[in-house]
Image (tube, rainbow, N blue to C red):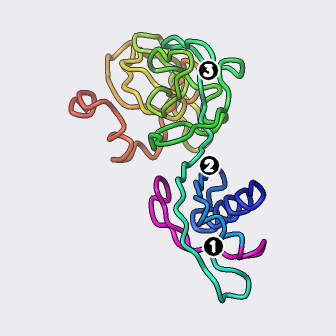
């Protein structure tokens, strides 16, 4: 009986994999004696069809033998298993996520679409807020490390036609690599947007910033610009 039930569950998992592209499932098939005898008559070669979105919970599957002359409908309880990045120790706000801070665990049941599922998505990122031990990391918990912080004196580069001009200013916002921040020059107090290019470094492109670039700035900075 255990062998037949294991084969039935494995066949349902393969069917779910084909239908969804996801390979990790827990399938429970509580067959009563009558259902077990009917499945046993199908032998050890059969096909599975049925089930429906979201493919979890109580599902009905049709089991057909290799000769396609007998079939039985079975009820299974299906749980999706997904890898998630879980915190091993509390990570404080502003800390970088290190390899020793996180691990992949298998999560059963409902999961937020914002859950981080790859170590590469988390390691090296900065915590926006404190993340407690044993918590699942969400995308909103992380951000790229800040290279420029509000109030810092920064170096501003302007490059065009092979010429590089360097000056200094004060950052009026925080920014990670590639983000736009407002900066104020030390002498003229002129304000403009520049892109973060390194630690305490900003770069002004000759082509200027686009509308989408300004959309990435905080609302009050965009309005001021």
Closer to the eye: label 2 or 3: 2
Residue 45 magenta-drawn? Answer: yes
Residue, disc 1: 48
Question: Residue 174 vs residue 94: left or right?
Answer: left
Q: Quadrant of residue 184?
A: top left
Residue at 61%, 80% in the rendered image:
71
How many marks on residues?
Answer: 3
Quarter of the image where the C terminus is located = top left
Q: Earlier in the sequence, mark 1 or mark 2?
A: 2
Say which of 41 and 163 sits in front.
41
Q: In the image, which disc is placed on residue 26?
A: 2
Residue, disc 3: 97
Q: Earlier in the sequence, mark 1 or mark 3?
A: 1
Q: Earlier in the sequence, mark 2 or mark 3?
A: 2
Whole-percent x and y of residue 16?
A: 60, 63
Residue at 63%, 73% in the rendered image:
48
Question: Residue 109 vs residue 187: left or right?
Answer: right
Say which of 141 and 68 sits in front.
68
For marks 2 and 3, give the CA distance.
31 Å
The magenta stretch spans which residues? 41-62
Whole-percent x and y of residue 108?
A: 56, 40
- Please determine whether, in this image, residue 40 is positioned above or below residue 96: below
Residue 158 magenta-drawn? Answer: no
SS of the residue under disc 1: strand
Closer to the eye: label 1 or 3: 1
For marks 1 and 3, give the CA distance.
44 Å
Quarter of the image where the N terminus is located = bottom right
SS of the residue under disc 3: loop
Residue at 47%, 11% in the rendered image:
153
For marks 1 and 2, give the CA distance.
16 Å
Whole-percent x and y of residue 198?
A: 59, 25
């Amino acid at each position: 009986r255990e062998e037949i039930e294991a084969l039935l569950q494995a066949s349902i998992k393969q069917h779910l994999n084909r239908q969804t592209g996801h390979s990790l499932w827990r399938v429970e098939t509580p067959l009563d004696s009558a259902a077990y005898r009917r499945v046993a008559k199908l032998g050890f070669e059969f096909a599975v069809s049925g089930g429906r979105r979201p493919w979890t919970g109580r599902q009905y599957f049709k089991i057909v033998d290799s000769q396609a002359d007998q079939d039985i409908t079975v009820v299974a309880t299906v749980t999706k298993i997904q890898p998630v990045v879980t915190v091993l120790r509390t990570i404080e706000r502003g800390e970088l996520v290190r390899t020793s801070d996180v691990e992949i665990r298998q999560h059963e049941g409902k999961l937020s679409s914002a859950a981080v599922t790859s170590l590469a998505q988390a390691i090296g990122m900065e915590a926006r807020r404190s993340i407690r031990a044993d918590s699942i990391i969400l995308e909103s918990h992380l951000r790229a490390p800040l290279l420029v912080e509000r109030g810092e004196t920064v170096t501003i580069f302007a490059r065009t036609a092979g010429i590089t001009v360097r000056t200094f200013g004060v950052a009026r916002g925080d920014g990670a690599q590639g983000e736009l921040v407002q900066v104020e020059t030390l002498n003229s107090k002129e304000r403009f947007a520049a892109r973060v290019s390194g630690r305490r470094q900003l770069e002004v492109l000759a082509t200027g910033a686009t509308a989408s670039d300004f959309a990435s700035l905080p609302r009050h900075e965009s309005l001021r610009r």
